[in-house]
Amino acid sequence: MKPIPFLILLGLLTTSWANDILPGHDPGKPIVLRGGTIHPISSAPLTDSKLLIEAGRITHLAPLTETLLGEEDAIVIDCEGQHVYPGLLSANGVLGLVEINAVRATRDLQEPGLINPSVRAEVAVNPDSELLPVARANGILTSLSVPQGGLISGKSALIHLDGWTWEEMTVRAPVGMHLRWPRMRHSSTATDESRKAQRKRWEESLEKLDQFFDDARAYQRAKAAPRPDFRSDVRFDAMLPVLEKRLPLYVHALGAIEIQKALQFTQAQEVTTVLVSGQDVWRVADLLKERDVPVILTTVQELPLRRWESYDQAHRVPGLLKQAGVRFCIANGEGNTSGASNARNLPYLAASVVNEAFSAEDALRSITLSAAEILGVGDQLGSLEPGKEATLMITDGNPLEITTNVQRAFIRGREIDLSSKHTELYQKYLEKQRRADP
Amino acid sequence: MSHRFPLGKPDFTDFEPEWVCSPRRCLASLKVAARVRAVNAQSRSFLVFWIACLLAPLSAAPPDLRPQEGLRENPSQSHALKGARVVVRPGDVLENGTIIVRDGRIEAVGIDLPVPADARVWNLEGKTLYPGFIDPYATFGQTKAPEKPVDAATWHPQIHAAEAVLDHVRVSAEDLKKRRELGFTSAHLVPTNGIFRGRGALLQMTDPQEPTFVLQREVGQHLAFVTGSDYPKSLMGCLALIRQTLSDARWYQAYRQAYRQRRHETRPGEREALTALGPVVTKRRVPAYFRIGNEADIDRALSLSQEFKLRRILVDSGHGYRRWQRLKRSGTDLILPLRFPETPAVEDPDRALDVSLEHLQHWEQAPAGPALLERQRIPFALSTHQLDDQLQSFWPNVRKAVKRGLSEEAALKALTQHPARLLGESERLGAIEYGRLANLVVAEGNLFRDKDAKILQVWIEGHPWHDTLEENTTSAAGHWRTAWTGVEGPESFQLRQDGKKLTVELGGDETEEPTKAEVKRPGRNELLFTLPATLFGASEGKVRLSAYQNIQTIVGQGVLPDGSRFTWSARRDGEIPITNTETKTVEKSEPSTAEMSPFEQYPAGAFPGRGPGMNPLKRRVFIKNATVWTCGPQGVLQNANVVIDEGRIVAVGRDIQPSKRSHVIDGTGKHVTPGLIDCHSHTAISRGVNEGSHAVTCEVRIGDVIDPTDINLYRQLAGGLTVANLLHGSANPMGGQNQVIKLRWGQNADGLKFKGAKPGVKFALGENVKQANWGDRFTTRYPQSRMGVEQLMRDTFLAAREYGARKQLHTEQEKAMPFRTDYRMEAVLEILQGERLVHIHSYRQDEILMFVRLAQEFGFTVGTFQHVLEGYKVPEAIAEINAGASSFSDWWAYKFEVYDAIPHNGALLHQAGVLTSFNSDDAELATRLNTEAAKAVKYGGVPPGEALKFVTLNPALQLRIAHRVGSLEAGKDADFVIWSGPPLSTLSRCEETWIEGTRYFHQTSHRERMVWVERERRRLIHQILTENDTPSKDEKASEGKEKEKGDEAPMDLARRLRLLSPWGQYEQIDHQALYHDGQSLHVCTGCYCDFR
């Protein structure tokens, strides 16, 4: 069927800090996925249908009975009993930028200093990271890699989790300029001194931020009519697309107070805003709706921010946002359960928010089409529609369920290898057990 | 030289030249007896009074031994305080009483007592006299000497048991004055450094130079649960150190005694700290004062006291009222700080979100705390402790407490009788009675209710050390009868005092308004006023009058409009009560029954687990027609019923019937599973998950530091969790003792414990214990490699084995010297003897295999390999010693030793015959262990019924509690969960969680509770906004935003928290307080902190 046994063998021969799984390759002819249930996301599920992939794109979605042009010499994949979904899109994370968090040499996450708008994530993405095959084996085919730390961390890049080089992998870059709003909340058990110190920190940060935006505008004017002694500054240069509303400002702010202040700031600065946030977003839903600020929810499987909030506060936010008409998607958080090493758990984040106000279909959309729309690639990714990229997967069930497995997956019409360091080691030690217990 | 106290001007005018009643002479004339009323008017006391008179010494004040310089001064040492309302003791009042003071003691108390000839008479009409107030726990003064060097005898820098506070604290006259002005005549000055802090001192608030200054040089033994930068770094380490030290003190006493007879034995050495603790641990002569850090410390102090049979006094943090039930049961003496919470910052609605409900509640309830304790008959004393720079708020706070229902009598008791008793001074302090020290407070107005009440005098051992009597001079108010010389004036006038305003009134009746004029008081006792000349027979103009008032008499002169002078005098013949219309605030006691209910709920805040009508035990429960995942031999049953009685499962099956009067749960469409069990948790651990100082700390006990207020317990219940194995962290190779709990939310620490669970200990291998990721500073603690880890463990086991042998030998010897118990070795010995399980944190296959061999060599039992992420590489070794494996379902790559971790680990181990569980090690992950189990299905194909056992039966077996929990089988505890759908589905939700027949989580009730929470927050915030105009905490913080150097930039903070140095968080754990929001704990043990 696929050259998997060969790949496993290859895996067994070497151990390294880089995966040695071959990227997908262009089959050179069309592919037809037939039967099963096709979930376009943008519309209701289809049965007795087929999907035609040509040159990396979906060209047709049609009933089985219909004959499609170009179908005759296509590779046919029978999906009977299975399900076809668009690839899942993780709208937040550090995939490719970090291998092992505790090992400093493997971290390419942030630069020193508070203001680093010029850095771009894509140039540090390691295509051979062992983390990428692990994520895509569970259907995460596209991911946003975001620089970390500071006030302005840099520019994110959207990458496909397959390719020989970062250039090949990059779907879109830059996607956004990332601003991290300083924490303005105090823990209820904080001491007076720590409150004071924290307040001082945020006030100083915000002063710096205001100053930087002012300076950037002055630079913008200076550059428009440069004097002979004009000197360039890569930080300010990086800000020009933001000031000119060509690049959205992704503001990371968690608590209600920070969200409020951040939104006031972006309004005053007249920049396009995307909010990256979590449990408290619903408290400002009306404002978000009014200003049409889309939200990337990154703290979905998290405890409530406050002791008095409901245990499932984070899970109720999507329903509340939907009700308020706010555009949003669900994305990976940080840490061991859904951060870079476990980006594969994205669909379970989405599953955890399903309730009477938010359906399983809503949940799926929030990690596919909604994410693509907010990241500005809604015309290419996120749903199964003719004209879009053939970045999709075949599963044996609803991807929101843990027990469901991804059977096959395609990125830009190229079938990818679903093996990983994990499956290789699994096979190796299965073999050990087999030999011990013949 | 000898009189530094300010002597007021005594009034000799009202002198009664009668003979004097002194105890020396009282036998001479028994007729006096008829005039002296023993204050409590009981015949027995009366008798005591007279016997005491016979035995009384000539002088009680401590003599001044200093040689006389110059002429002697011998003012009278006798005083008569007359006319006051004398509060002899709480609830016992003499109106218009007289107190005779001689030589610093009270010589007589009564009504109409004869005044001794040599006595100065103080007219205190209209005043109230209280026994001097006693501060039972005061911190003031400055440390004057550096701490003593630590020698081998005292060994630990936090043990100062032998030190007396006066040896290292310098008290200034100013410190004493501040307390005197509040009415305190005595105070227990306490030491404030260390864990064992040493002895306090009972001081009279006179002057450090005075012979009267010290009442008791050594009072009590002071303890506090504090941690430092070395052992103990954690609360549990602190408790372990206290336990070992108390045990050592006992041993040392016994050993020294034995050594006196047998000088050829090993010398015990001179250990002054242990000597000092002798009377604390034996015969209960010296009480232990426990400084309570938070309300959970109350239970800790009580159980330590019980363990070592200490006489204990708890010094509350201000939250103790929440634990009144426990306090009542224990019959403990309590010292309350009179500091009430500051007004929470709620003005900004967004910021108000971060003010927790229990904080709001505390703001409302804390002032009613003393009243609650009174109602519950829990004895307490009030102290200035914690007031620090806010001493002046002491009386406002007393009045606040009284306003909120504390009776005046109880308040007075808490300032006099109770502290006197606690300090062993019931005979000398605390009441105004014959023979006691003449410590007295003279007050004007009602100190307990009237905010304008004043303390005019404070007498300490017979001297008025604080005296503002004259400044607040006796009011001139009253009816005055005049005598005019050389002029015809009105026969009488009245002076009325209203606040500070004094008015003279003449004439007037029903028909006519009186003539009024304001009286000015330009100087002490001076009166100055003008009256219309018509009253003096002249036709027009004013008459100017000036006078000197001396209590009952006025002498003065006047000038008529024509300039002629005259003299006049007046004598008071009637009283007019002083009024106070300007600032009069009638503060009536508010009924506080409405406030009772929050006190009944525990823990405070949004989701209490215990309270009236909450979580009642259902004797009989019947679940009908559900899909039951028994996790036992019955497997998964469709359309099955479960019968529960008295907290136990009676039967599970299809055709079983309910008992009568059962609580019926319709399980149609629902799934029922056993309560989930988390085999690796750090939830509900107070102030330090790691005792990460020493490499071996097996003496520390998680069970000592359970935090029953941790909201994550409730959140995890809402995810179906019923049992958790609370483990020490992995910062050292041989860590502390674990504690298995049931999530009986609302119970105290003890009530959470899973009684009968086999004791265990946490060990650890690999990167954490060799400090691989702690930063470059940490390179010296042994071990620094996996090689050393093995050697350290081997050496410790050998040490314990030898310890055990010595102990054995000891019991066999006939005349053995007392044996010193070493709690660290005891714990390791228990492991070797098979009484304690080892839970071994491990990752790599090499270390797993090493530990298997070590276990085989020393023959101990491994309960679980924890994490064991490379267990799949050596399952046969784990199976060989029948150890369990408790793993993450899918975590990997957060540090180098987990780079080979794979999610198939669980399945591979399981399939190789290893008893396998999945755990959380994370407060949030513990809220959804059911879907973690599903990962064993996904990765490796474990059947769903078996996979669910990864979080139910298997951890139960690993923890040796499977006879009680882990499956739904007849005879086991009724710990179960009702799910909306299949338990392994990410779309199913926990609807109810039951433990032993009690429902601890119910989704529907939770939603109702949320409505209450919102309402309660709104109510309290509204109340704060309407009641309070003072700037709140947050605003104040912003006021002083001066620039400080070296402050961290946000990025550095974020870095430290998340990325570069996960070990920095390790320090933060120490500050984990009760009632945290659940978030900070998550950070501490959570994502980026790799002490897992």
Image (cartoon, coloured by chain):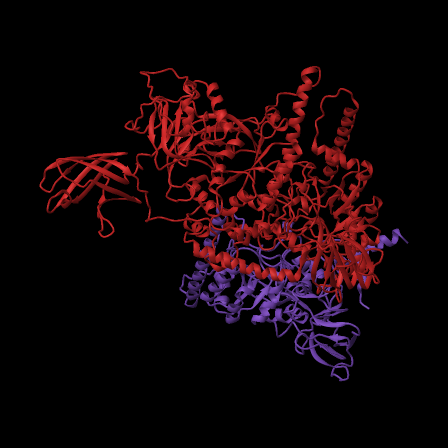
Chain colours: A purple, B red
Front in this rendered view, residue B691 or B354: B354
Q: Position of residue B390 (x, y in %)?
A: 43, 41
Name the spot of residue B710 as percent of width and height, x first: 62, 50
The quarter holding residue B563 reads top left
Q: Can residue A128 be seen in this view?
A: no
A437 lies above or below A33: above
> In the depicted view, which residue is nearer to us: B144 or B722?
B722
Which quadrant: the N terminus of chain A?
A: bottom right
In the rendered image, residue B1059, in percent from the top left (x then y), is placed at 60, 51
Residue A268 visible in image: yes
Report the front residue among B988 and B335: B335
Residue B587 left/right relative to B197? left
- Quadrant location of residue B321? top right
Q: Please identify the quadrant where the C terminus of chain A is shown.
A: bottom right
Between B107 and B619, the one lying in front of the other is: B107
The number of numbered badges drawn on the structure is: 0
Which quadrant would residue B1027 be assigned to in this image? bottom left
Note whether B515 is above or below A50 in the view shown. Answer: above
In the picture, measured across the screen, residue B910 lies left or right of residue B686, that is right
Q: In this view, does A174 lie above or below B206?
A: below
Residue lying furthest left in this view?
Answer: B562
How far across and how far down the image is residue A38, in percent? Answer: 73, 75
Q: In this view, does B586 lie to the left or right of B935?
A: left
